[in-house]
Amino acid sequence: MQLKRRKMSRGVAPALGLLTANLLLATAALADPLGPAAPPPVANANINDDTETDLGLTRVDSAVLFYHEANGRVQTTEPMISVAFNSEDGDVLSVKLTSDTLTGATPNGAAPWKQAQTFTTPAQAPGSTAVVTSASGGSSLVTLPGTGTVVRQYTTPAHQLPTDTGFRDQRYAVDAGYSMQWSPESRVSIGGSVSTERDYRSGSINAGYSRDLFEKNTTVSVGLNLEFDQSRPYFGTPTPLTVMSGDAKGGNKSKTVQNIVIGVTQVMNRIWLANLNYSAGQSDGYQTDPYRIISVVDPVTGGPTQYLYESRPSSRFRQSLYMGNKIALGPTFADVSVRAYHDSWGINSITAEINERIPLLSWIYLEPQARYYSQTAATFFHDYLVSGQPLPTYASSDSRLGKFSATTLGLKLGIKTGSTSEFYMLAENYKQSGKSTNPNAIGDLASENLFSGVNATSLVVGFTFAFR
Amino acid sequence: MRNTRIRGRVSGRTLTALALLLSTLTLPACGALGVKPWDHDLLAQRAMQLNTHPHITACHEHIYFSKEGSSGGRTFDGGGCGCN
Protein backbone atom coordinates (compact mmCIF):
# COMPACT_ATOMS: atom_id res chain seq x y z
CA MET A 1 0.00 0.00 0.00
CA GLN A 2 2.84 2.30 0.86
CA LEU A 3 4.44 1.61 -2.49
CA LYS A 4 1.23 2.31 -4.33
CA ARG A 5 0.72 5.57 -2.53
CA ARG A 6 4.29 6.61 -3.35
CA LYS A 7 3.78 5.71 -6.97
CA MET A 8 0.63 7.74 -7.28
CA SER A 9 2.22 10.76 -5.73
CA ARG A 10 5.58 10.58 -7.50
CA GLY A 11 4.76 8.79 -10.71
CA VAL A 12 1.27 8.69 -12.11
CA ALA A 13 0.11 12.08 -10.90
CA PRO A 14 2.94 14.08 -12.53
CA ALA A 15 2.61 11.92 -15.64
CA LEU A 16 -1.07 12.65 -16.00
CA GLY A 17 -0.39 16.29 -15.21
CA LEU A 18 2.15 16.43 -18.01
CA LEU A 19 -0.27 15.00 -20.55
CA THR A 20 -3.06 17.31 -19.42
CA ALA A 21 -0.77 20.32 -19.61
CA ASN A 22 0.35 19.31 -23.08
CA LEU A 23 -3.23 18.90 -24.28
CA LEU A 24 -4.15 22.32 -22.91
CA LEU A 25 -1.07 23.84 -24.53
CA ALA A 26 -1.97 22.14 -27.78
CA THR A 27 -5.49 23.52 -27.64
CA ALA A 28 -4.15 27.02 -27.21
CA ALA A 29 -1.46 26.66 -29.86
CA LEU A 30 -3.61 24.96 -32.46
CA ALA A 31 -6.34 27.54 -32.10
CA ASP A 32 -4.32 29.61 -34.54
CA PRO A 33 -1.34 27.51 -35.59
CA LEU A 34 -0.53 28.87 -39.03
CA GLY A 35 -1.80 32.41 -38.87
CA PRO A 36 -5.20 33.86 -39.72
CA ALA A 37 -4.96 33.03 -43.43
CA ALA A 38 -4.12 29.39 -42.91
CA PRO A 39 -6.73 26.67 -43.44
CA PRO A 40 -7.98 24.69 -40.47
CA PRO A 41 -5.35 22.11 -39.56
CA VAL A 42 -7.78 19.24 -39.71
CA ALA A 43 -8.16 19.83 -43.47
CA ASN A 44 -4.85 18.03 -44.10
CA ALA A 45 -5.28 15.42 -41.41
CA ASN A 46 -5.01 12.55 -43.85
CA ILE A 47 -2.55 9.90 -42.79
CA ASN A 48 -2.49 8.52 -46.32
CA ASP A 49 -1.05 11.76 -47.65
CA ASP A 50 0.94 13.28 -44.82
CA THR A 51 3.98 15.06 -46.21
CA GLU A 52 3.89 18.02 -43.81
CA THR A 53 7.34 19.06 -42.60
CA ASP A 54 8.24 20.83 -39.37
CA LEU A 55 10.21 23.59 -41.09
CA GLY A 56 9.53 26.86 -39.28
CA LEU A 57 7.43 25.13 -36.62
CA THR A 58 7.92 24.40 -32.96
CA ARG A 59 7.06 20.80 -32.14
CA VAL A 60 6.02 19.62 -28.71
CA ASP A 61 5.92 15.90 -28.03
CA SER A 62 4.95 14.40 -24.69
CA ALA A 63 4.46 10.82 -23.64
CA VAL A 64 4.21 8.65 -20.56
CA LEU A 65 5.49 5.11 -20.22
CA PHE A 66 3.76 2.81 -17.73
CA TYR A 67 5.88 -0.32 -17.31
CA HIS A 68 4.87 -3.25 -15.12
CA GLU A 69 6.69 -6.54 -14.50
CA ALA A 70 4.77 -9.59 -13.31
CA ASN A 71 5.21 -11.12 -9.83
CA GLY A 72 5.71 -7.82 -8.05
CA ARG A 73 8.92 -7.02 -9.88
CA VAL A 74 9.89 -3.58 -11.21
CA GLN A 75 7.27 -0.97 -12.01
CA THR A 76 8.09 2.26 -13.80
CA THR A 77 6.24 5.43 -14.61
CA GLU A 78 8.23 7.57 -17.00
CA PRO A 79 6.81 10.86 -18.27
CA MET A 80 8.79 12.72 -20.93
CA ILE A 81 8.39 15.89 -22.93
CA SER A 82 10.43 17.36 -25.75
CA VAL A 83 10.32 20.67 -27.56
CA ALA A 84 12.01 21.13 -30.95
CA PHE A 85 12.41 24.58 -32.47
CA ASN A 86 12.73 24.24 -36.26
CA SER A 87 13.93 27.19 -38.33
CA GLU A 88 12.88 27.75 -41.94
CA ASP A 89 16.47 26.86 -42.91
CA GLY A 90 16.35 23.44 -41.32
CA ASP A 91 18.21 24.21 -38.10
CA VAL A 92 16.78 22.38 -35.10
CA LEU A 93 17.22 23.12 -31.39
CA SER A 94 15.68 20.45 -29.18
CA VAL A 95 15.32 19.89 -25.46
CA LYS A 96 13.91 16.81 -23.76
CA LEU A 97 13.04 16.26 -20.11
CA THR A 98 12.48 12.79 -18.65
CA SER A 99 11.50 11.65 -15.21
CA ASP A 100 11.60 8.07 -14.06
CA THR A 101 10.01 6.49 -10.98
CA LEU A 102 10.96 2.90 -10.23
CA THR A 103 9.57 0.69 -7.49
CA GLY A 104 9.21 -3.02 -6.85
CA ALA A 105 11.42 -6.03 -6.36
CA THR A 106 14.54 -6.85 -8.30
CA PRO A 107 16.47 -10.18 -8.24
CA ASN A 108 19.47 -9.96 -5.92
CA GLY A 109 21.40 -12.65 -7.82
CA ALA A 110 21.15 -15.50 -5.31
CA ALA A 111 19.86 -18.88 -6.48
CA PRO A 112 16.48 -20.12 -5.18
CA TRP A 113 16.60 -22.85 -2.56
CA LYS A 114 14.23 -25.34 -0.95
CA GLN A 115 14.47 -23.47 2.35
CA ALA A 116 13.92 -19.83 3.18
CA GLN A 117 16.97 -17.59 2.73
CA THR A 118 17.76 -14.45 4.74
CA PHE A 119 19.94 -11.69 3.31
CA THR A 120 21.71 -8.92 5.18
CA THR A 121 22.55 -5.54 3.70
CA PRO A 122 23.89 -2.30 5.19
CA ALA A 123 21.39 0.20 6.55
CA GLN A 124 23.80 3.08 6.89
CA ALA A 125 25.73 5.11 4.34
CA PRO A 126 29.56 5.02 4.59
CA GLY A 127 30.80 7.24 7.43
CA SER A 128 27.30 7.86 8.73
CA THR A 129 25.60 6.60 11.84
CA ALA A 130 22.14 7.53 10.63
CA VAL A 131 19.92 4.74 9.38
CA VAL A 132 18.81 5.82 5.92
CA THR A 133 16.19 3.23 5.22
CA SER A 134 13.02 2.17 6.92
CA ALA A 135 11.60 -1.24 7.56
CA SER A 136 9.42 -1.50 4.50
CA GLY A 137 8.82 -3.78 1.58
CA GLY A 138 9.23 -6.99 3.57
CA SER A 139 12.56 -6.09 5.20
CA SER A 140 13.41 -5.31 8.80
CA LEU A 141 16.11 -3.43 10.69
CA VAL A 142 18.25 -5.52 13.02
CA THR A 143 20.96 -4.47 15.47
CA LEU A 144 23.85 -6.91 15.30
CA PRO A 145 24.64 -8.26 18.81
CA GLY A 146 27.83 -6.91 20.32
CA THR A 147 28.55 -4.38 17.57
CA GLY A 148 25.62 -2.01 17.73
CA THR A 149 25.59 -1.94 13.93
CA VAL A 150 22.14 -1.62 12.43
CA VAL A 151 21.60 -3.69 9.31
CA ARG A 152 18.67 -4.43 7.05
CA GLN A 153 17.49 -7.99 6.58
CA TYR A 154 14.94 -9.56 4.28
CA THR A 155 13.87 -13.16 3.83
CA THR A 156 12.91 -15.03 0.68
CA PRO A 157 10.52 -17.98 1.12
CA ALA A 158 11.52 -21.48 0.01
CA HIS A 159 11.64 -22.18 -3.74
CA GLN A 160 11.20 -18.53 -4.63
CA LEU A 161 13.50 -16.27 -6.60
CA PRO A 162 15.39 -14.10 -4.09
CA THR A 163 14.50 -10.48 -4.71
CA ASP A 164 15.27 -7.28 -2.87
CA THR A 165 11.92 -5.67 -2.31
CA GLY A 166 13.40 -2.37 -1.13
CA PHE A 167 14.14 -1.30 -4.71
CA ARG A 168 13.05 2.29 -5.29
CA ASP A 169 14.51 5.12 -7.29
CA GLN A 170 13.74 8.40 -9.00
CA ARG A 171 15.63 9.62 -12.05
CA TYR A 172 15.61 12.95 -13.85
CA ALA A 173 17.24 13.47 -17.23
CA VAL A 174 17.75 16.40 -19.59
CA ASP A 175 18.80 15.98 -23.21
CA ALA A 176 19.58 18.90 -25.50
CA GLY A 177 20.79 19.06 -29.06
CA TYR A 178 21.33 21.43 -31.94
CA SER A 179 21.66 20.48 -35.58
CA MET A 180 22.18 22.79 -38.51
CA GLN A 181 22.69 22.80 -42.24
CA TRP A 182 26.46 23.16 -42.72
CA SER A 183 26.28 23.33 -46.51
CA PRO A 184 23.57 22.46 -49.05
CA GLU A 185 24.72 18.82 -48.81
CA SER A 186 25.80 18.45 -45.21
CA ARG A 187 24.58 18.81 -41.63
CA VAL A 188 26.36 18.98 -38.29
CA SER A 189 24.95 18.37 -34.84
CA ILE A 190 26.05 18.67 -31.24
CA GLY A 191 24.28 17.58 -28.11
CA GLY A 192 24.55 16.54 -24.53
CA SER A 193 22.65 15.00 -21.67
CA VAL A 194 22.72 14.78 -17.91
CA SER A 195 20.78 12.46 -15.67
CA THR A 196 20.69 12.00 -11.96
CA GLU A 197 19.17 9.44 -9.64
CA ARG A 198 19.79 8.76 -6.00
CA ASP A 199 22.61 6.33 -6.62
CA TYR A 200 23.80 7.16 -10.15
CA ARG A 201 24.84 10.19 -12.18
CA SER A 202 25.53 10.36 -15.86
CA GLY A 203 26.55 13.00 -18.37
CA SER A 204 27.33 12.80 -22.06
CA ILE A 205 28.29 14.94 -25.02
CA ASN A 206 27.94 14.04 -28.67
CA ALA A 207 28.65 15.38 -32.14
CA GLY A 208 27.59 14.25 -35.58
CA TYR A 209 28.16 14.96 -39.25
CA SER A 210 26.13 13.80 -42.24
CA ARG A 211 26.48 14.37 -45.96
CA ASP A 212 24.09 13.80 -48.83
CA LEU A 213 25.35 12.18 -52.02
CA PHE A 214 23.94 11.14 -55.39
CA GLU A 215 21.03 13.63 -55.64
CA LYS A 216 20.28 13.11 -51.94
CA ASN A 217 19.55 9.44 -52.47
CA THR A 218 22.43 8.53 -50.17
CA THR A 219 23.33 10.00 -46.80
CA VAL A 220 26.50 9.00 -44.99
CA SER A 221 26.87 9.94 -41.34
CA VAL A 222 29.20 9.61 -38.40
CA GLY A 223 28.42 10.29 -34.74
CA LEU A 224 30.61 10.36 -31.65
CA ASN A 225 29.47 10.17 -28.04
CA LEU A 226 31.36 10.46 -24.77
CA GLU A 227 29.62 9.43 -21.56
CA PHE A 228 30.76 9.87 -17.97
CA ASP A 229 28.98 7.90 -15.26
CA GLN A 230 29.31 7.77 -11.51
CA SER A 231 27.91 4.92 -9.44
CA ARG A 232 26.95 6.05 -5.94
CA PRO A 233 25.44 2.98 -4.21
CA TYR A 234 23.25 3.77 -1.19
CA PHE A 235 25.55 2.03 1.23
CA GLY A 236 28.85 2.25 -0.59
CA THR A 237 30.55 0.05 -3.15
CA PRO A 238 31.32 -3.50 -1.99
CA THR A 239 34.60 -5.19 -2.83
CA PRO A 240 33.86 -7.78 -5.54
CA LEU A 241 33.69 -11.41 -4.40
CA THR A 242 33.63 -10.56 -0.69
CA VAL A 243 30.95 -11.95 1.60
CA MET A 244 27.63 -10.09 1.68
CA SER A 245 27.28 -8.24 4.98
CA GLY A 246 25.75 -5.27 6.74
CA ASP A 247 29.10 -3.50 7.01
CA ALA A 248 29.55 -0.12 5.33
CA LYS A 249 31.25 -0.34 1.95
CA GLY A 250 33.72 1.68 -0.11
CA GLY A 251 33.36 4.95 -2.00
CA ASN A 252 31.79 5.90 -5.31
CA LYS A 253 33.00 4.48 -8.61
CA SER A 254 33.08 5.90 -12.13
CA LYS A 255 32.94 4.74 -15.71
CA THR A 256 33.52 6.28 -19.14
CA VAL A 257 31.91 5.19 -22.41
CA GLN A 258 33.09 6.17 -25.88
CA ASN A 259 30.88 5.44 -28.88
CA ILE A 260 31.05 5.83 -32.61
CA VAL A 261 28.24 5.17 -35.07
CA ILE A 262 28.91 5.15 -38.81
CA GLY A 263 25.84 4.96 -41.01
CA VAL A 264 24.58 4.97 -44.58
CA THR A 265 20.98 5.78 -45.40
CA GLN A 266 19.99 4.87 -48.93
CA VAL A 267 16.92 5.39 -51.06
CA MET A 268 16.74 1.97 -52.68
CA ASN A 269 13.79 2.75 -54.91
CA ARG A 270 10.50 4.66 -54.84
CA ILE A 271 9.07 2.58 -51.98
CA TRP A 272 12.14 1.46 -50.02
CA LEU A 273 14.44 3.41 -47.70
CA ALA A 274 17.30 1.51 -46.03
CA ASN A 275 19.66 2.42 -43.20
CA LEU A 276 22.85 0.56 -42.32
CA ASN A 277 24.77 1.39 -39.12
CA TYR A 278 27.97 0.06 -37.67
CA SER A 279 28.52 1.07 -34.06
CA ALA A 280 31.35 0.44 -31.65
CA GLY A 281 31.63 1.39 -28.01
CA GLN A 282 34.32 1.08 -25.36
CA SER A 283 33.37 1.20 -21.65
CA ASP A 284 36.06 1.52 -19.00
CA GLY A 285 35.61 1.64 -15.25
CA TYR A 286 33.20 0.24 -12.72
CA GLN A 287 30.60 -1.99 -14.44
CA THR A 288 29.72 -4.32 -11.60
CA ASP A 289 26.24 -4.21 -10.05
CA PRO A 290 26.95 -3.08 -6.45
CA TYR A 291 23.72 -4.61 -5.11
CA ARG A 292 23.99 -7.97 -6.78
CA ILE A 293 25.33 -11.15 -5.16
CA ILE A 294 25.98 -14.72 -6.26
CA SER A 295 25.37 -17.86 -4.21
CA VAL A 296 28.23 -20.16 -3.24
CA VAL A 297 26.68 -23.60 -2.81
CA ASP A 298 27.57 -26.87 -1.16
CA PRO A 299 29.15 -29.22 -3.76
CA VAL A 300 26.85 -32.10 -2.75
CA THR A 301 23.50 -30.72 -1.64
CA GLY A 302 23.49 -27.44 -3.61
CA GLY A 303 22.50 -25.54 -0.49
CA PRO A 304 23.85 -21.99 -0.08
CA THR A 305 26.96 -21.72 2.11
CA GLN A 306 27.56 -18.00 1.58
CA TYR A 307 26.70 -15.08 -0.67
CA LEU A 308 29.43 -13.08 -2.45
CA TYR A 309 29.16 -9.71 -4.14
CA GLU A 310 29.44 -10.20 -7.89
CA SER A 311 32.41 -9.14 -10.02
CA ARG A 312 32.56 -7.95 -13.64
CA PRO A 313 35.46 -6.86 -15.89
CA SER A 314 36.26 -3.15 -15.93
CA SER A 315 36.54 -3.04 -19.71
CA ARG A 316 33.92 -3.84 -22.31
CA PHE A 317 34.02 -3.39 -26.09
CA ARG A 318 30.71 -3.59 -27.95
CA GLN A 319 30.06 -3.77 -31.66
CA SER A 320 26.86 -3.97 -33.60
CA LEU A 321 25.66 -3.97 -37.14
CA TYR A 322 22.14 -2.67 -37.61
CA MET A 323 19.99 -2.51 -40.70
CA GLY A 324 16.67 -0.71 -40.72
CA ASN A 325 14.23 -0.54 -43.61
CA LYS A 326 11.12 1.45 -44.37
CA ILE A 327 8.97 -0.02 -47.12
CA ALA A 328 5.73 1.41 -48.49
CA LEU A 329 3.48 -1.47 -49.46
CA GLY A 330 0.28 -0.13 -50.93
CA PRO A 331 -1.38 1.95 -48.22
CA THR A 332 0.70 0.32 -45.49
CA PHE A 333 4.21 1.09 -44.26
CA ALA A 334 6.51 -1.64 -42.99
CA ASP A 335 9.44 -1.05 -40.64
CA VAL A 336 11.80 -4.04 -40.73
CA SER A 337 15.10 -4.11 -38.88
CA VAL A 338 17.78 -6.59 -37.84
CA ARG A 339 20.79 -6.23 -35.58
CA ALA A 340 23.81 -8.41 -34.95
CA TYR A 341 25.74 -7.66 -31.76
CA HIS A 342 28.97 -8.84 -30.16
CA ASP A 343 30.91 -7.70 -27.13
CA SER A 344 34.16 -8.58 -25.40
CA TRP A 345 32.29 -10.14 -22.48
CA GLY A 346 31.28 -12.94 -24.85
CA ILE A 347 27.69 -11.91 -25.50
CA ASN A 348 26.49 -12.39 -29.08
CA SER A 349 22.95 -11.48 -29.98
CA ILE A 350 20.54 -11.23 -32.86
CA THR A 351 17.52 -8.92 -32.91
CA ALA A 352 14.78 -8.82 -35.53
CA GLU A 353 11.83 -6.46 -35.49
CA ILE A 354 8.89 -5.75 -37.75
CA ASN A 355 6.17 -3.12 -37.50
CA GLU A 356 3.37 -2.77 -40.03
CA ARG A 357 1.38 0.46 -40.12
CA ILE A 358 -2.10 -0.14 -41.46
CA PRO A 359 -4.48 2.78 -42.11
CA LEU A 360 -8.06 2.15 -41.03
CA LEU A 361 -9.56 5.51 -42.00
CA SER A 362 -8.02 8.75 -43.23
CA TRP A 363 -7.32 9.80 -39.63
CA ILE A 364 -6.57 6.59 -37.75
CA TYR A 365 -4.12 3.73 -38.15
CA LEU A 366 -3.07 0.59 -36.33
CA GLU A 367 0.48 -0.73 -36.17
CA PRO A 368 1.07 -4.31 -34.99
CA GLN A 369 4.64 -4.80 -33.77
CA ALA A 370 6.76 -7.89 -33.18
CA ARG A 371 10.36 -8.25 -31.99
CA TYR A 372 12.55 -11.27 -31.38
CA TYR A 373 15.81 -11.19 -29.46
CA SER A 374 18.28 -13.94 -28.59
CA GLN A 375 21.61 -13.73 -26.78
CA THR A 376 24.40 -16.01 -25.63
CA ALA A 377 25.83 -15.86 -22.11
CA ALA A 378 28.77 -13.77 -20.98
CA THR A 379 31.89 -15.86 -20.35
CA PHE A 380 31.74 -15.13 -16.61
CA PHE A 381 28.03 -15.88 -16.17
CA HIS A 382 27.32 -18.56 -13.53
CA ASP A 383 24.03 -19.53 -11.92
CA TYR A 384 26.06 -20.08 -8.74
CA LEU A 385 29.60 -20.81 -7.57
CA VAL A 386 30.63 -24.07 -5.89
CA SER A 387 32.16 -24.11 -2.43
CA GLY A 388 35.70 -25.51 -2.30
CA GLN A 389 36.51 -24.59 -5.89
CA PRO A 390 38.89 -21.71 -6.75
CA LEU A 391 37.10 -18.38 -7.10
CA PRO A 392 37.03 -17.03 -10.66
CA THR A 393 38.21 -13.45 -11.24
CA TYR A 394 34.78 -12.47 -12.53
CA ALA A 395 31.41 -13.98 -11.73
CA SER A 396 27.83 -12.79 -12.10
CA SER A 397 24.49 -14.57 -11.99
CA ASP A 398 22.65 -11.60 -13.55
CA SER A 399 20.19 -13.18 -15.98
CA ARG A 400 20.75 -10.22 -18.31
CA LEU A 401 24.22 -11.68 -18.87
CA GLY A 402 22.91 -15.23 -19.29
CA LYS A 403 21.58 -17.08 -22.29
CA PHE A 404 17.96 -16.28 -23.10
CA SER A 405 15.59 -15.16 -25.80
CA ALA A 406 12.82 -12.59 -25.65
CA THR A 407 9.75 -11.70 -27.65
CA THR A 408 7.80 -8.48 -27.77
CA LEU A 409 4.31 -8.25 -29.19
CA GLY A 410 2.60 -4.90 -29.36
CA LEU A 411 -0.08 -2.81 -30.98
CA LYS A 412 0.19 0.88 -31.69
CA LEU A 413 -2.74 3.17 -32.39
CA GLY A 414 -2.33 6.55 -34.04
CA ILE A 415 -4.99 9.22 -34.43
CA LYS A 416 -4.32 12.30 -36.53
CA THR A 417 -5.97 15.21 -34.78
CA GLY A 418 -4.68 17.87 -37.18
CA SER A 419 -2.18 18.44 -39.98
CA THR A 420 0.70 18.53 -37.49
CA SER A 421 -0.72 16.78 -34.45
CA GLU A 422 -1.22 13.18 -33.43
CA PHE A 423 -2.36 11.18 -30.46
CA TYR A 424 -0.60 7.84 -30.15
CA MET A 425 -0.72 4.85 -27.87
CA LEU A 426 1.28 1.62 -27.73
CA ALA A 427 0.46 -1.44 -25.62
CA GLU A 428 2.87 -4.35 -25.59
CA ASN A 429 4.07 -7.43 -23.78
CA TYR A 430 7.76 -8.30 -23.36
CA LYS A 431 8.63 -11.81 -22.27
CA GLN A 432 12.01 -13.41 -21.69
CA SER A 433 12.44 -17.18 -22.03
CA GLY A 434 15.36 -19.25 -20.82
CA LYS A 435 16.35 -22.56 -19.36
CA SER A 436 14.37 -22.62 -16.12
CA THR A 437 15.66 -25.87 -14.64
CA ASN A 438 19.04 -27.49 -15.16
CA PRO A 439 19.12 -31.28 -14.59
CA ASN A 440 22.91 -31.04 -14.27
CA ALA A 441 22.69 -28.54 -11.43
CA ILE A 442 24.19 -29.62 -8.11
CA GLY A 443 22.00 -31.51 -5.65
CA ASP A 444 18.52 -30.14 -5.09
CA LEU A 445 19.24 -27.08 -7.25
CA ALA A 446 18.32 -29.33 -10.19
CA SER A 447 14.66 -28.88 -9.31
CA GLU A 448 14.82 -25.12 -8.70
CA ASN A 449 13.95 -22.48 -11.32
CA LEU A 450 17.28 -20.73 -11.87
CA PHE A 451 16.07 -18.41 -14.63
CA SER A 452 14.95 -15.01 -13.44
CA GLY A 453 13.73 -13.54 -16.74
CA VAL A 454 10.99 -10.93 -16.81
CA ASN A 455 7.47 -10.84 -18.17
CA ALA A 456 6.45 -7.22 -18.58
CA THR A 457 3.54 -5.27 -19.96
CA SER A 458 3.87 -1.65 -20.90
CA LEU A 459 1.75 1.18 -22.17
CA VAL A 460 2.93 4.37 -23.84
CA VAL A 461 0.46 7.21 -24.26
CA GLY A 462 1.57 10.30 -26.13
CA PHE A 463 0.49 13.44 -27.91
CA THR A 464 2.48 15.59 -30.32
CA PHE A 465 1.67 18.82 -32.09
CA ALA A 466 3.44 21.67 -33.85
CA PHE A 467 2.76 25.37 -34.13
CA ARG A 468 4.34 28.37 -35.78
CA MET B 1 35.61 -21.73 -21.65
CA ARG B 2 38.32 -21.71 -24.30
CA ASN B 3 35.81 -22.55 -27.01
CA THR B 4 33.54 -19.75 -25.91
CA ARG B 5 36.41 -17.28 -26.00
CA ILE B 6 37.49 -18.37 -29.47
CA ARG B 7 33.93 -18.28 -30.72
CA GLY B 8 33.48 -14.80 -29.28
CA ARG B 9 36.69 -13.51 -30.86
CA VAL B 10 35.77 -14.90 -34.26
CA SER B 11 32.32 -13.40 -33.99
CA GLY B 12 33.74 -9.97 -33.17
CA ARG B 13 36.15 -10.10 -36.09
CA THR B 14 33.38 -11.34 -38.34
CA LEU B 15 31.20 -8.41 -37.35
CA THR B 16 33.98 -5.90 -38.07
CA ALA B 17 34.84 -7.57 -41.38
CA LEU B 18 31.18 -7.67 -42.36
CA ALA B 19 30.78 -3.97 -41.60
CA LEU B 20 33.87 -3.06 -43.64
CA LEU B 21 32.82 -5.33 -46.50
CA LEU B 22 29.28 -3.95 -46.59
CA SER B 23 30.43 -0.33 -46.50
CA THR B 24 33.05 -0.98 -49.19
CA LEU B 25 30.61 -2.73 -51.47
CA THR B 26 27.48 -0.73 -50.86
CA LEU B 27 28.72 2.85 -51.07
CA PRO B 28 29.87 2.72 -54.74
CA ALA B 29 26.71 0.79 -55.55
CA CYS B 30 24.60 3.53 -53.96
CA GLY B 31 25.11 5.68 -57.05
CA ALA B 32 23.20 3.16 -59.10
CA LEU B 33 20.28 3.10 -56.68
CA GLY B 34 17.79 5.79 -55.77
CA VAL B 35 15.09 7.77 -57.53
CA LYS B 36 14.68 11.11 -59.23
CA PRO B 37 13.38 14.03 -57.14
CA TRP B 38 9.90 13.81 -58.71
CA ASP B 39 9.56 10.22 -57.48
CA HIS B 40 9.81 11.14 -53.81
CA ASP B 41 6.05 11.12 -53.22
CA LEU B 42 6.05 8.06 -50.95
CA LEU B 43 9.48 8.69 -49.45
CA ALA B 44 8.32 12.13 -48.33
CA GLN B 45 5.51 10.68 -46.23
CA ARG B 46 5.89 11.12 -42.48
CA ALA B 47 5.32 7.39 -42.07
CA MET B 48 8.52 6.75 -44.07
CA GLN B 49 10.74 8.50 -41.52
CA LEU B 50 13.19 6.10 -39.92
CA ASN B 51 12.00 7.14 -36.46
CA THR B 52 8.39 8.27 -36.53
CA HIS B 53 7.89 8.32 -32.74
CA PRO B 54 11.12 9.24 -30.92
CA HIS B 55 9.59 8.87 -27.45
CA ILE B 56 8.42 5.31 -28.18
CA THR B 57 11.87 4.48 -29.55
CA ALA B 58 13.42 5.96 -26.40
CA CYS B 59 11.11 3.85 -24.20
CA HIS B 60 12.12 0.73 -26.10
CA GLU B 61 15.82 1.57 -25.92
CA HIS B 62 15.51 2.14 -22.17
CA ILE B 63 13.60 -1.10 -21.50
CA TYR B 64 15.88 -3.25 -23.64
CA PHE B 65 19.04 -1.58 -22.30
CA SER B 66 17.97 -2.36 -18.74
CA LYS B 67 16.78 -5.93 -19.40
CA GLU B 68 19.19 -7.33 -22.00
CA GLY B 69 22.93 -7.75 -22.41
CA SER B 70 23.05 -5.90 -25.74
CA SER B 71 22.45 -2.27 -26.59
CA GLY B 72 22.98 0.20 -29.40
CA GLY B 73 22.84 -0.33 -33.14
CA ARG B 74 20.24 2.21 -34.10
CA THR B 75 22.13 4.83 -32.10
CA PHE B 76 24.72 5.12 -29.32
CA ASP B 77 24.82 2.25 -26.83
CA GLY B 78 25.28 4.20 -23.63
CA GLY B 79 22.38 4.18 -21.23
CA GLY B 80 22.76 7.23 -19.05
CA CYS B 81 21.26 5.42 -16.09
CA GLY B 82 22.23 2.89 -13.49
CA CYS B 83 19.63 0.30 -14.42
CA ASN B 84 22.19 -1.96 -16.09
Image (tube, coloured by chain):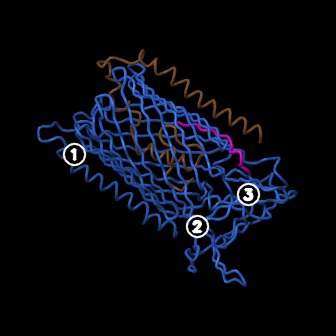
- Find disc 1 in the rendering and name its residue: A30
Disc 1 with disc 3 on a shared chain: yes
**Of residues A296 and B18, the one drawn nearer to the viewer in this rendering:** B18
Q: Which mark is residue B47?
A: none
Q: Chain of mark 2?
A: A
Q: Residues under labels 1 and 3: Cα distance? A: 56 Å
Q: Note whether A172 is above or below A141 in the view shown.
A: above
Which of the two residues, A186 or A99, is positioned nearer the viewer here? A186
Q: Residue at x 31, y 35 (%)?
A: A363
Three-letter amino acid code of the residue under disc 1? Leu
- Residue A396 lies in the magenta stretch: no
Do callouts 1 and 2 mark residues in contact (Cβ within 8 Å)? no
Looking at the image, is mark 2 or mark 3 earlier in the sequence? 3
Q: Amino acid at mark 2?
A: Gly
Left-right relation of A465 to A309: left
Give the drawing colour for chain B: brown
Q: Which residue is mark 3?
A: A111
Mark 3: amino acid: Ala
Which stretch is magenta? A370-382
Letter of the chain that mark 3 sits on in the rendering:
A
Q: Which residue is rendered at x = 68% and y = 36% of the image? A: B9
Check disc 1: other Cα within 10 Å, few if <14, some if 14-19, many if 20+.
Answer: many
Mark toward the viewer: 1 or 3: 3
